[in-house]
Structure formats: C-alpha cells, structure tokens
Amino acid sequence: MANALFYLMALLSVASALGVVLAKNPIQCVLSLLGSFFCLATIYLLAGFQFIAAAQILVYGGAIMVLFLFVIMLLNLGDPGTADKTDARMFSRPNVAAVVVVAALLLGVAVYAVKLSPVVHAAQELPERGIDTVHGLAGEMFGRYLLPFEAVSLLLLATAIAVVVLAKRERSPKRGAKS
Amino acid sequence: MVIVKRKELSFAEQLYIPEILRGLSITFRKMFEPKVTRQYPEEALIKTDVTRGQPRLVVNEDNSIACVSCGLCEAACPAYAITIDGGETEREIEREPKRFDIDMLRCILCGFCEEACPKDAIYMSDELELADYSREALIYDMDKLKRPKKALQDRIDYVNRINDRWQTPSST
Amino acid sequence: MIAWQDLLVMVLKIALIFGGLINVGALMTLAERKFSAWMQYRIGPNRVGPWGLLQPLADGVKFIFKESLMPDGANKALFRFAPVIAALPAFMTIAVIPFSNDIVIAGKNYGKLAIADLDIGVLFLLAIGGLSVYGVILGGWASNSKFSLMGGLRASAQMISYELTLILTILAVIALSGTLNLAEISDGQATIGTWNIWSQPLGFMLFVIAMFAETNRHPFDFAECEAELVAGFHTEYSAMKFALFFLGEYSAMTVISCLATVLFLGGPSVPFWVDAPWYVGFGAFIAKTSMFLFLFIWVRWTLPRFRFDQLMGLGWKVMLPLALFNLFVTGVFVSLGWNLWAKLGSLI
C-alpha cells in the first residue's frame, strides 16, 4: 500500500516536473510545480517526516508559489501566445541529446554525492529519538548542526539585505541635499 | 483655497483599539432597540391625506357615473394610459363613457387626470396594491375603476382644501 | 485489523464534525443577515420557516437552480477548479481540531472528539489553511476580468502579509506549550488561570486581527471590496460555484475560530469546573467558538474598510514588529523558566 503510493507519487512528481518545463502557459507551469511539491510532501510523509512535509507545503506551497503566481499575474505573462516555449526547434536531435547527457551527468553526480556525503552516513547513526518527530529534529538541528544552520540563516539574511539594497531606488540629489 | 485642519489625535485615538471598542459597543446596543421594519402584507401601509394612489372613477349617490367623457384626462395623461369611448345617455348630462380603460401598467400615478377633470369625476384613491398574473388583467375597465363617492371622500375633501388655498386671497 | 467498533466510532465522529461544519457554514449566512438586520433596526429574514431558520436551505436550492455562467475567454479548467480549492482547505483543516476532552460513555473511553490527532496539528492546519489563497487568486485570474484579477492580487498580497503575523503569534503559544499537538495544547490549559490569553494578551490581540485578515473579512475584505471591485475575485461566479466560495469563507471562519479557542481560550475547558464531563466541555467549546463567530459578524457591521496601503502598512510596520516582539519576550520568559502565569493559574 505505502509502496504503491510511493511509486504513484514519484511518478506524479516527475510528470508534473516535466509539466513545469513543457507547459505553454506560465500559470500552468507554476501549478505543475505546485503539484510536484505536493507529491514530494506526500513522499516525505510516507517516509515518516511529518514536520518536513508540513514545512514543504507551508513554505513552498503556501508562500513562495503564491508569490510566483503574483509576479506572473502582475507582469501579465498569462497569455500563452507570448511565451511559446514548445518550439519545434526545441526538440531537434542535438538538443534532445544534450538534455539526455546533462541529465545523466547530474544524476550520476547526485548519486555519487549521496553515497559520499557525511550527512547520509551520520543519518545512519541517528539519536534514539530519530528525526521524524519535531523534538528529534529540533534536537539535531539546534544541537549537532547548529553551526551549518546558523550559517544558512546568515546567508539568507545577507541575501535579503542585498535584495533590499538593490531594489531601493537611488535618492535623487535634491532630496539628498535636503535631508 | 481651503485648508482643512485635521484634528490632532490623542494617544488613545491613535491606538485605534479604544475607538473600535466604542463603535462595537454602539452597534451592540442598537441590536436591542425597537425595529422600524413594517411587515408589509400583514401590516398595512400607512396612508395619510396626501397619499396619491391609483386613479378611480366617482360614482354618484344615485348610482350614475360622474364622468361625462369629455376626454380632458385622456389628453392630460402623460403616459397615454387612459382610453375613453364616449356615448349618449338619457340623463340630464347627456353624455357618459361607454368605455373607460386605464392601463395600470402605464399609469405613473401623477394625478394630472384628477387636476384636469372639470366634473370632479376622477380622483386618486388611496389604493396602492397592484399585482396580477397577466398584463391584460392590469388594464382596468370601468367596472374595476368605479368607486362610490363615499369611498373617495377623504381625497375629495383634501383636493378641495388645497384648491381653495389658491383661489381665495390670502389673509396676510 | 481495526475492530469494527472503533471504525464505527471514527465514522460517527467524522460525520458529526464534518456535518457540523457545513451546517455552521450555512447557519452563519443566516446569522450574518439576522445580526446585521438587528444592528440596523431591521428584523431580517423571517419568512422561510420559524425565525427564517430554513432560509439557508432556500438559498441553497436557489443556488442549485441558478444558471452557471462561464465568462468569455476564461480559463475553463481553472475557473471550475478555483471554488473547489477555496472550499477544500477549511474542510481538511477541521480534522485536527480537538472539540472535547475524552468522551466517556458508560465507563468506556472513546477518545477526544477529533478526526485526527496529529503531532504536527498546528503546522498541518497552517500549511493546508494557507492554500486557500489559491482559490482566490486562481479564481480571480481565470475569470478573465479586471475586477476579479485585482481582487485576486490584493487577496494574495494581503493573505501572505498577515499569515506571517498569524504564524508568529501561534509560535509564541507553541513556545509556551512546548508542543505542536493541538490536543496537548488544549490539555495544558485545563483551568481558567492557565488559559493562554492571560499570558499572551498581545499575542491574542494580534491573532484576532490577523484572523480577520486571513479569512478576508471586514475590515480587511480586499478580495471582495464591493465599493471598488464590484465583487472582487468572485465577480464572474454564479450558482453553486459562487456558493462554494461562500461556504469556503464561512468554513474558514469557523475553523479559525476553533483554532483561536484551542490556542487561547483553553479549548473545552470550563471555567472554575476542572472535572466537567466531556459534554459540558464540548458545550463550552461551542460557546467560545460562537463568540468568535459573532465577533466576525459584529465587526463587519461596525467598522469601515481599510485603504489598501493602510492595510499593508498595518501588516508590515505594526503587526509584524509587535508579533516579533511578543515572540521574543515569550522566548525570554520560557528560556528563563519564568512561568508566572502557570503558577498563578495553579492557585486558582
């Protein structure tokens, strides 16, 4: 039962990931991505990671994808005619070959990385609480992995500040003189 | 140029919450005050002297119709709601309507027919309700329009009083 | 293998909660009209059934027989799908609300009146509840109408902004309770002195304000905004699709009122009666939730609508800093172990 559900969800998530790339309408792309996230969340849930599943839907489904939709609607990209990505040229033989090669390379790198990764090895010696409950996850995240966690938060903070600085309009000289 | 001076808000007003609570208390109190709704079909409409309802034809005490089918109301009617066919009669007035139809769907209850009538034969009654299942049924013929003079007496008195105010010179 | 008695109990609970939610949604439409009428010296609907109680039924029948219009140039699939997305999250999230203490009938314990007892109850509720914005934004976009699009865009901006405040205030409560499980949160507030509203007065106020914004209710109903946008995102909707949007809105109000009851008012705990039987607790829960629902209606017929920039300013410049401050103070108190209110509560 759980296995069948896993394969169904895996298949669906791949299918909707393809939909992201192949759909003509930007809105449909976003919705496909959303579907893919949901399938991933279900897979997390099947693996017993409730918190990560909920966070996936809460952060990606509830906030980030809404912003994507927001931007697409604001820029009025909803017209399929303007963004016709499924051009006949796209599926020419060299293109397809290149895609296959790159995908195979990426897959190889990913598998290699997972096999070598210290995180995976560490995961095999989990604390007795495990990381599938919120308590266990929090214990791990704010205990053993506190430094990486904080580093990532700092990185995010730096990004946020950078975005604000870039997005801020330059002050006109007149106003600057006054203040 | 008009410079509108905004009132300086006190701290409590800037917090906004106390003002919200004040508003809420007002609406809450209003919930228990007497209602103004009139339950229409059960409770009749309030009729006053000036109520100007649908036009009706006056029937005299001797059961004869007061109208002489002069056609002035037909001419005065802005909505072309009135249709009159005149005819002769043995009575002293010699003429009376053979047909007097008012299309109540066209009538705008303006009261011009009442003003135009030289024989005080048509008056705006206090009847206001108008509903039926077909358009044809709402073209009222003479049988539906006739009312004894007594039923229209309030309106007749009112119109006479109003007219009198204009005819006699004012005392001041 | 699950014993059939357990299955029966489960099915009964689901039927009770789900049926209750839909009926509350229907009754809320009547309550909205009744209370608004009373506040305006009117009587309100009173023709269909005693005190107009069958009015929602009549409305439902009317909605079913209305013509379902499809605007020109609309995205057909999304147009049909949007009302479903709008109504679904509320129906899903009601599953994790614990409505009563353990049900004990004839000495046998049937568990709490809740469909699911999730360890991550609060997170699940927030995650699924946050999806209701898709119904609004997709409905607005798929309608191929300027008003609808504007309504959808405003609603999405607003809901994202206020969700932050909502989550931060809930986070403070979670920090106090030390659990994400809604049942455990309400268990931790068994006596009136331990209700979270006493230790989180600021959080409670922020939560109530954000709750209005999250459900798109007055004074934050920018998704609809009749005065400017005709009817906002559901301008083009008619018949049962429109009714689904309505049902979704009222169900979301009900769910978030239940959440407020669990988080701040101790769920099924009865003031000054700790050992109250489960049905009294259930009654207390219903009473507290009804209070919030009445507040929704009451505020709607009292306050005027905000201006959109005021709304965003309030959300980002006032509510969010206050929520962060509240979370910070709560964190300091919890980490130092100063649980003043719990001590005070144990005295009562």
Image: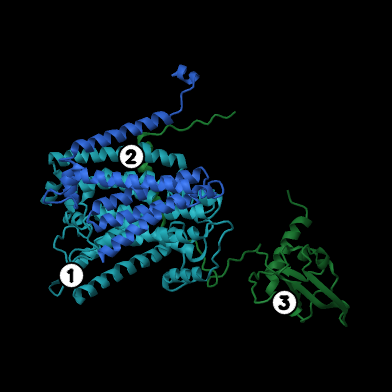
Q: Which residue is mark 1?
A: C110
Give the alpha-carbon distance from disc 3 to disc 2, as whole Å.
67 Å
Judge whether C138 appears above or below C44 on screen.
above
Q: What crowding class fits label 1: few (fewer than 14 Cα within 10 Å), some (14-19), or many (20 or more)?
A: few
Q: Nearer the viewer, residue A151 or C340?
A: A151
**Drawn side of residue B101 relative to residue C255, left or right:** right
Q: Count of labels shown?
A: 3
Chain B colour is green
Residue sitting at 18 percent across and 68 percent down? C103
Front residue of C123 and C326: C123
Q: Earlier in the sequence, mark 2 or mark 1?
A: 1
What number is the disc on residue C320?
Answer: 2
The disc numbered 2 marks a residue on which chain?
Answer: C
Q: Amino acid at mark 1?
A: Tyr
Gap between marks 2 and 1 measured at Cα: 41 Å
> What is the chain letter for disc 1?
C
Q: Three-letter amino acid code at disc 2? A: Leu
Q: Position of residue C222 (x, y in %)?
A: 46, 48
Disc 3 marks which amino acid? Glu
Most foreground residue, A50 or B35: A50
Q: Are marks 3 and 2 in contact (CB under 8 Å)?
A: no
Residue C184 percent location from the top left of the image: 18, 56
Which color scheme does this rendered protein use? Answer: by chain
Q: Is residue A76 left or right of residue A151?
A: right
- The chain in cyan: C
Q: Secondary structure at mark 2?
A: helix
Q: Which residue is mark 3?
A: B136
- Which chain's colour is blue? A
Same chain shared by disc 2 and disc 1: yes
Where residue B57 sits, quadrant-wise, is bottom right
